[in-house]
Amino acid sequence: MAAQNEHTFAPPTAAVVVVSPQSPFYSGDEVTLRCDIAEYTDWDQYFWYRNESHVPKINDIITIRLPEEAGQYQCSGWRKDHPQTSYISSPTDIKHHASPKATVVMSPKPPLYSEERVTLRCNIDNNTDWGRYNWYKNNSPVRRESSKTITITLPQAVGSYQCSAERRDRPQASFMSSPTDITLHDPPTATVVVVSPLSPFYSGERVTLRCNITECTDWDQYYWFRDSSPVPKISKIITITLPQEAGQYWCYGQRKDRPKTSSTSPSTKIANHAPPTAAVVVVSPQSPFYSGDEVTLRCDIAEYTDWSQYYWYRNTSLVSSQKSATITITLPQEAGQYECSGQRKDRPQASSLSEHRHIWYKDISKAVVTLMSNWSDVFSGETLHLQCNIQEEHQHKHWQYSWYKNGDNLVGVSSGPDYTVMHANESHSGIYCCRGTRRGDSETSEAVRVTLLEKPTPVLRGPPQTWLTEGDSVTLSCEVGGSTTAWRFHWYKTALYRPELPQVTQSGRYYVELVSDSIRGAGGSYTLSPAALRHTGVYVCRAERGEPAYHTEFSNPQPLWVTGLSPPSSLVVYPNTNQHFTFESLSLNCEGSGNSTGRTLRGFSRRIDHTKCPSCWTEVSVYWCQSDSGEQSNPVNITVYGGDVILESPAHPVTDGDPLTLHCRYRNQSSNISADFYKDGTLLQTSTTGEMTIPAVSKSHEGLYKCSNPERGESPESWITVKAPDSGSSLLVTVGTFVRLVIMFVLIIMLLLLYRFKKLKVVNNRDVQNMGQIRRTVRLQELIMGLRQNICLCKEVMEKNMRKWLLYIQEQKHEFLKQMQELDMSKCLCTL
């Protein structure tokens, strides 16, 4: 019974209560929740659930953060006493609301046009107490703009705009607005339209133009321009008159509403079109026309075929107005200048007046142009002589001759058949023809081409080797344009200045005189046989032809250097070498024997530039001495070099059998370094001392020599001449005799001293007490020993240097004899 009276009670019920903040909740909010259980207060532990999943929190109050912990929250409690647990609460939905979204509103509405001002407003539906607005253009903040409304100007501010807002209360920030694109819209397009007539337009016509604008119809004013200048008309349609108002036209329009201005139209060219061109065409017969011919002419107009009337003119006077395009005329009565034009009903109503057509008759006469010179080429400065020959069955007098050049360019009219130009030049080159005129014309002659060539320069050719030996034979040749035909030749040689002598500027400046044995018209050759010292010099030639004589330029120079066996005078070179560095000292002196007086140093130079080394220029000169009577020395080749290497070789020819030493010298360096020596381009030897010696030269050693070093470069080439022995061999006997006399003289002195010594020795044996005599004896013994040594030394030195003396004496024998007379023989023992 007691069990039946017992009651069963439900556990206490839990509830989730939001403490703060008030809903709605926004992203970033922290929400505080409390688990309330109405019965009892001694709940020891609380259990929290989100979306039916346990949350590890046991307090009655918890705090969550949105949006990460949004969801449906439930809770329950536990205590030690009975009842120990409460019911789990009903779900409480804690969710976050999106922040208010901003919207950009623009005014005016699109389309937007250039130069307009656009107002942008940032609208947010919820709340009105937004304190700051943030504006962005193309995702970049717009500085100095924090108000709700901003104003921009087109086209500079074109772009994509967004905004957002901030406030103190919840929600503190709005969402960013969607992008609003501010784009520039092209204004309405204007176009110039030709209303009437259709193009092409002709002179005298009135052309109507209309300014068409595609959008809108309420355009208040139209503005017109012609060739960049305003036209004082403001209507949509204008009318212009040709040809006065032809030009480039364009327009634009204005209105009160947006858009206020249209674009400027593209230009439209209104041009005055030339009328169709008429031309007079000869139908038959073919020209030339002769007396009695009937000539049919047609007026051809290329455009259109409906020409109703044709007008014909002869010598500017109207002769016919007809529907047919052809007329027939009779010669010679109706010969003259003919023109025509056409007329039709539609546009264009008239053609242009044709070019005049010369309809004339002529007799059958043929003209021929002849070049009257005996040669086909004409040079600048010569006389141009042409003749016009008119070929006809019956010769008539009183022709008038007209000369034409290069077509219809009239260059001369004369009563005679000759056309002459004295001293013609290049401007007279051209194609010449002639025509004879009396009561009728002759035929125009066949053209003759006349080309005026530059004044020719002959080519002088000589032997490949310009260094000759006295007695050789040499022939020079002279040609003009590769030929000697019809030319007469003159030969010249360099000479000392005289006022009457011509000056030559080929390869320098020098004066020349006619060679005394030069033969005029000798077929272009000049022979020297046998060659002599007096033939040394530089030769040129010149040609002439015609009467009066026409002279060419002087030819290229041809040097000839003749070496004699016993020249009456000599050129002394110091230092005795034919190559020298620039800026070094060089002495050239003329010396001679016999009755020669007034010796003059003469020379010929030419400069050679080197492309690979601009500073390494070479000046090659040939010098010789010449007396007033014409006697000459042997020529000497002197080379002045701007480079770093020269070859030192004798300036004068080397005698057959003598030694020859070549030395390779380097600029600014006294010590010797290795050098390669070449003859005629072939390597002879390589020397570590920079010297090469030929013990005894022969004729086979003649040639071009040079030396080189891989680091310093190479020298210019020098020609080595080998001559036969001459009177110098007798001088060898003289010098040998002189040396033997010196040795004999010294031996006699030595014998005398030995005799005196023996005599003193006997005296010494008799009386040795005189100490002064003993000292003199010692001094005599020392003197004798010294004499013996000097004698031996003198003999050795004289034998060793004999060859060098002979070479030096051979080159400067006159100076040597003079010095021998002044020689103090007492110095031989101590200096030789």
Image (cartoon, grey):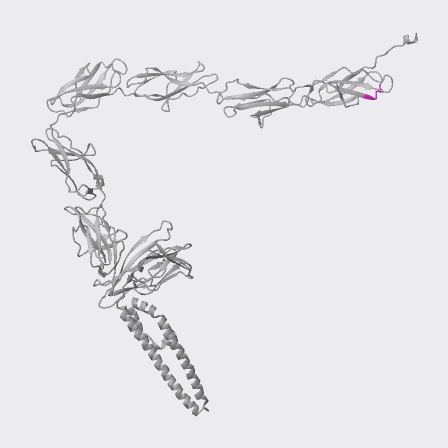
Main SS of the magenta part reads loop
Note whether residue 500 is visible: no
The furthest residue to the bottom: 766
Q: Is residue 44 magenta?
A: yes
Specify whether 620 is left or right of 111.
Answer: left
**Residue name at image x 8 percent, y 33 percent:** 398
Specify whether 67 is left or right of 202.
Answer: right
Specify whether 60 is left or right of 136.
Answer: right
Which contiguous range is marked in magenta? 41-45
Residue 35 picture location, percent across and down? 79, 19
Q: Is residue 623 magenta?
A: no
What is the quadrant of the N terminus in the image? top right
Quarter location, residue 339? top left
Note whether residue 445 is visible: yes
Choose between 17 and 649: the one closer to the eye: 649
Residue 204 picture location, percent across and down? 28, 18
Quarter location, residue 180? top right
Decide: is 613 above or below 445: below
**Residue name at image x 36 percent, y 49 percent:** 611
Residue 647 picture location, percent across and down? 36, 59
How many discs appear? 0
Decide: is 1 above or below 174: above
Choose between 387 and 215: the one closer to the eye: 387
The furthest residue to the right: 1
Choose between 416 and 294: the one closer to the eye: 294
What is the quadrant of the C terminus in the image? bottom left
Residue 780 picture location, percent across and down? 41, 84
